[in-house]
Image (cartoon, rainbow, N blue to C red):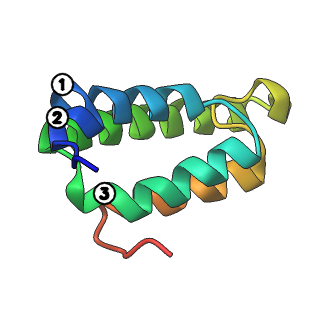
Amino acid sequence: MKKITIEQAWGRSGLMAVSAVRYCLGRRTYIVSDCQEWLCDIWDKLPEKAKDIIQHDVEEAFKSDDEDRANGKNYSVRTIGSDCDRRCWEQVRKLWRNEGAE
């Protein structure tokens, strides 16, 4: 079996990884936890450009979610979702905050 290249695995500049995260941001439960586990496993292998974009997107989602929560929005319309979803994204955030994701 032929091995795939990094470009084939992540797409141009990590496009497929970025797309997966963008799909999962705002979703609920199992897909969020699966994405979080996957990101924690592959983070060191991603292209730097993809890491930068993912970091930006997640940080922007947290800002928006903080506003949603401060304004009393229901979890079904919050940017990040339920508390369990937010905890997953907090684990992802640890990847660039040098806190060590669990």
Dividing the picture into quarters, in which one does residue 8 lie? top left
Locate residue 98, reporting x and y percent. Answer: 28, 71
Q: Cα distance, mark 2 to mark 1?
A: 6 Å
Which kind of residue does numbered mark 3 sit on?
A: Trp
Q: Can you identify the residue that label 3 sits on?
A: 43
Task: Sort mark 2 into few (<14), some (14-19) or many (20+) by Cα contacts within 10 Å.
Answer: few
Task: Sort mark 3 into few (<14), some (14-19) or many (20+) by Cα contacts within 10 Å.
Answer: some
Which kind of residue does numbered mark 1 sit on?
A: Arg
In primary-sequence order, the first of circles 1 and 3 is: 1
Q: Nearer the viewer, residue 44 or 78?
A: 44
Q: Nearer the viewer, residue 51 or 99?
A: 51
Q: Residue at x 51, y 63 (%)?
A: 91
Q: How many marks?
A: 3
Dividing the picture into quarters, in which one does residue 71 lie? top right
| Cβ atoms at labels 2 and 1 below 8 Å apart | yes
| SS at mark 1 in the image | helix
Dividing the picture into quarters, in which one does residue 4 lie? top left
* Residue furthest to the front: 1
Q: Residue at x 72, y 29 (%)?
A: 78
Q: Residue at x 28, y 50 (%)?
A: 1
Of the residues tagged 1 and 3, which is closer to the observer? 1
- Residue 79 visible, this orientation: yes
Which kind of residue does numbered mark 2 sit on?
A: Glu
Q: Can you identify the residue that label 2 sits on?
A: 7
Q: Is residue 89 left or right of residue 32?
A: left
Q: Can you identify the residue that label 1 sits on?
A: 12
Q: Residue at x 34, y 58 (%)?
A: 42
- Residue 94 visible, this orientation: no
Locate residue 47, reporting x and y percent. Answer: 16, 44
